Amino acid sequence: MDGNGCRKCLIKFVDKEAADMEKSIFEVITDYAVNEGLGSVIKQDDEYRKIQNKISDTTSEFDALCLPKDQRLVVDRLLTSYNESGACYGRMTYQRGFRDCAALLVEIGLIKDGKMEESA
């Protein structure tokens, strides 16, 4: 990606997250990477596409059941809970991998330890 593309992404990223000042920069980076940064990459992944097709087929089967509204809502809440759990897991594993990568880069000397040193 060229400098212009990076700058556009950064501006979009900062504008979107500016309203939520409670988040740490690490959480903001995670949200962007997980929710937006992977979008175009994951859609090209064969395994992801197969799963999406399976979801579509299963959704058609579910719709054909013609369940009453109250039953559909229970199923919807269950699936939403599973999705929220998966999203939380994805964020946590992304952050853990990010930390592990940074620790590895410090350990092999490619980056300095980012801890603040007290000045006299």
Image (spheres, grey):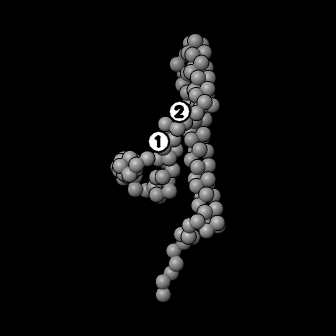
Residue 42: horizontal and vertical position, in percent? Answer: 55, 36
Q: Does 10 appear above or below 44? A: below
Name the secondary structure under disc 2.
loop
Front residue (pair 110, 88): 110
Q: Does 86 appear above or below 53? A: below
Q: CA distance from mark 1 to mark 2?
A: 12 Å
- The residue identified by callout 1 is 36
Residue 11: horizontal and vertical position, in percent? Answer: 35, 50
- The residue identified by callout 2 is 43
- Would you call the spot at circle 1 few (<14 residues within 10 Å), some (14-19), or many (20 or more)? few
Residue 45: horizontal and vertical position, in percent? Answer: 58, 33
Is residue 14 shown left or right of residue 48? left
Is residue 20 shown left or right of residue 113? left
Residue 19: horizontal and vertical position, in percent? Answer: 36, 51
- Give the residue at x 53% y 32%: 43
N-terminal of the two: label 1 or label 2? 1
Front residue (pair 62, 54): 54
**Which picture quadrant has residue 83?**
top right
Q: Which amino acid, by three-letter code, is at mark 1?
A: Glu
Q: Which amino acid, by three-letter code, is at mark 2?
A: Lys
Total label count?
2
- Give the residue at x 40% y 49%: 2
- In the displayed image of the protein, which residue is found farthest to the front? 2
- Give the residue at x 43% y 47%: 1
- Would you call the spot at circle 2 few (<14 residues within 10 Å), some (14-19), or many (20 or more)? few
Name the secondary structure under disc 1.
helix
Residue 81 appears anywhere in the view = no
Q: Which mark is residue 91?
A: none
Residue 120 appears anywhere in the view = yes
